[in-house]
Amino acid sequence: MGNKPTIFFSHSSKDKDVLLKFRNRLADITNGTLDIFMSSDGESIPFGTNWVHKIEQGLNDAKIMFIFITQNSLLSNWIYFESGFTYAKGIEVIPVGLGVDIGILKPPLNLLQGFNLNSGESLNNFITIINQKFDYKFKNNFTNKDFALLVDNETKFSLQTDLSKLFKSINYEILSKYSNAEYDIDKLFFDIKNYLDSNSMPYSYDENYGDWSRKNKCLLVQGIKIVYIIESSKTQDNKPDKLKFSISPYNFNQSFDLFNKFMQFLVEKNWIWLHMKLLDDFSYVTEVEKISSMLSNYPDVFCHSKNDIGGFEFIPKGFKFFVFDDNQWKQIKEKDFALGISYDPAKATAEDMFEFIYTLLEQNIIYES
């Protein structure tokens, strides 16, 4: 390193190409007045003398380490080792969330002051910190276009509120009667309606939805359509009544949180199964043995559902999931794959769901066709 102030980028080797673009842009904005050293994780810098020499070479003059928290780096304990090594040398360590909320970090990283990247404006935190640390006066010139440089797959980082770039439908269905259980869905439907009324929430209601002779009912509120299909009144059919929930992928965080509130009225049922279908530009890995192989490299994040072939669990959030053909029991030859996600609505948040979906993208269980 020369006489320039040095900052240190700690990151996963899998994020190297994306962060190299950002380093070059930061060097342009700061007019080449900084030495910006990029490390990698244990995959690129092995343990031993060479690793120590390379790290120390980057840290000799460094005043700041920005440690990039991504799904890739979270899957390795390397970030904790490298940040601890740096912190012990008296260097300021700043966690930076990229596609991951740094609020989920464990000690000791969660004790450090950091920030999340979610826009061009958030990138200007780098400029603010550099100006304060080195008494510079660079302008906040990062834009949303610069933020896009950080995105190796732009869809992944646009999922923070909007899943419509990935999913075409998100549905949930509950019947009034199953082989081993019964649910009072009439009460559930009107409990939801009463909740909307008591909280003065605007909604649309039709008590003769669709075919007027069927007496079906429908509610529409905040991107959620609830259709109450009444079969019991038709004596010639021996079918259970059903409630069908369609949740718009747009503004999903708002709709999902409201949907979970609705599910609190269904006290007999603790777990909910959502069915999520992708846009035509995306696909799921569908072979269970392939999914098993792909996820087996991350035993702290994924595991098998022991009593369900093809079922898996997302350990950090307690989700259960599987990929299935929705046409399997409909006597339709054309396959229509969906992701089934089971979770506890009393505990899950939209942020949990975003993290889960993002992780499936990172592991290529969901991929661009």
Image: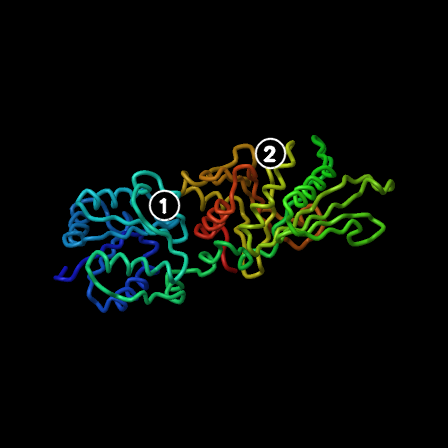
Above-or-below relation of 141 to 364:
below
Q: Nearer the viewer, residue 7 or 288?
A: 7
Disc 2 element = loop
Relative horizontal placement of residue 302, taking residue 341 as reference (left or right): left
Q: Give the spatial CA distance, label 2 vs label 1.
A: 30 Å
Q: How is the image coloured?
A: rainbow
Position in image of residue 355 (x %, y %): 46, 47
On the picture, is 277 further left or further right than 117? right
Residue on which disc 1 sits = 74
Q: Residue furthest right?
A: 236
User: Tag 1: Cα neighbours inside 10 Å, few (<14), some, or many (≥20)?
Assistant: some
Number of numbered markers: 2
Amino acid identity at mark 1: Leu
Q: Residue 207 appears at what percent x and percent y?
A: 78, 49
**Depicted 185 relative to depicted 364: above or below:** above
Pinpoint residue 56: horizontal percent, then vertical percent: 16, 50
Q: Which mark is residue 84?
A: none
* Quadrant housing the N terminus: bottom left
Q: Quadrant of residue 210?
A: bottom right
Residue at the left extreme?
Answer: 3
Earlier in the chain: of badge 2 and badge 1, it is 1
The mark lying in front, picked from 2 and 1, is: 2
Q: Does 155 sit left or right of 12 as displayed?
A: right
Q: Are marks 2 and 1 in contact (CB under 8 Å)?
A: no
The location of residue 228, given as percent across then percent down, is 74, 45
Q: Secondary structure at mark 1?
A: helix
Q: Nearer the viewer, residue 190 or 198?
A: 198
Q: Residue at x 80, y 43 (%)?
A: 231
Q: Amino acid at mark 2?
A: Asn
Count neighbours of disc 2 (C-alpha within 10 A) and say few if under 14, some if 14 to 19, many if 20 or more: few
Residue under label 2 = 270
